[in-house]
Amino acid sequence: MSNTHRSHRRRKKSSAGKVGLAGALTGAVGIAAVAVGMLVLRPGSDGEADAPPALSGQSGAPEATPAPKVGPALSITTPEGYAYSLAAAKAGVDSKPLSDSTPAPSGSTYAYAEYVITNTQKRPVLLDFPADLFLPRAHVPKAARERCMPQVGVPDDMCTLPNHSKVTARLDDSQAPVQDGGDTLIPPGASYLVRVATDLVVDEDLDTTDIKLYVWNARYTSDRKGVELALPGNAA
């Protein structure tokens, strides 16, 4: 269920051939009683071999909520032809940003950011988590700085810690994710709110305006350089 920090790369391929089969799901999203707590370790996380996002096995669909205010949208397409729209919603710090986070010790906290992912196609597409969280290296405890990885196209003083992402809500009338042969798929037109949070603590005095979201993996960017998802009000 996790992506590795050792490789620091996202999964390169998935069941792309299954998208034809997944087309049949367009009229069958009634099986959507799935998917609370879909977790995947982001680039920079410790774990074994790369694996696709997977359902937790819990019953029920993610809660439906109104769409949040977001920054400018970024459109991306993977080599398999999956197309998404991404838009940053907010960033912050919290002592327990995700339900499975270990409470941060006194004097420290976790960084998190939220973004909206939308399937812009008329067929189900793979649920993936393209955006990664970056923060100033100076706010990473010295003992963890070697775990904080820089990326081309991202300012030199920023880096990404081991972290993982979770779908926290369906937006508006979006249908819940569906599962096909071990892959988790986003129905056509559906939008989800994703929260990505660090697995390692950061300094408690981290300014939330210094937390950024970037799409940097070569799977999503043609020039292998990080592209920022600007938060609302922070667009250049």
Image: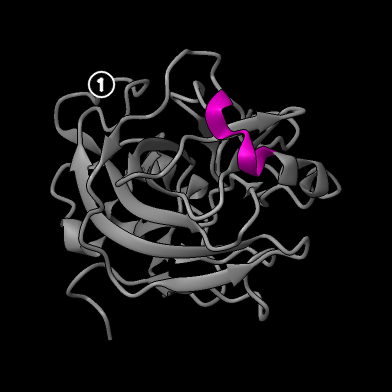
Residue at horizontal 65%, vertical 29%?
Answer: 179
Is residue 211 placed above or below 128 in the rendered structure? below
Question: Which element is circle 1 on?
Answer: loop
Q: How many marks?
A: 1
Q: Looking at the magenta stretch, what is its main secondary structure?
A: helix
Residue at left offset 59%, top offset 32% = 178
Instruction: Point out residue 119 in the picture as x, y percentages from the top left corner.
Output: 53, 56
Residue 138 image position (x, y, % from top left): 30, 58
Residue at point 48%, 13% (across, down): 58
Say which of 152 and 175 sits in front.
Answer: 175
Residue linked to disc 1: 103
Q: Which residues are magenta?
A: 25-31
Residue 162 visible at all: yes
Q: Position of residue 171 (x, y in %)?
A: 33, 46
Q: Position of residue 65 (x, y in %)?
A: 24, 40
Position of residue 114 in the picture relative to residue 17 (left or right)? left
Q: Is residue 216 magenta?
A: no
Amino acid on which disc 1 is placed: Pro
Q: Classify residue 172 as left or right of residue 154.
A: left
The reply to whether the magenta stretch includes residue 29 is yes
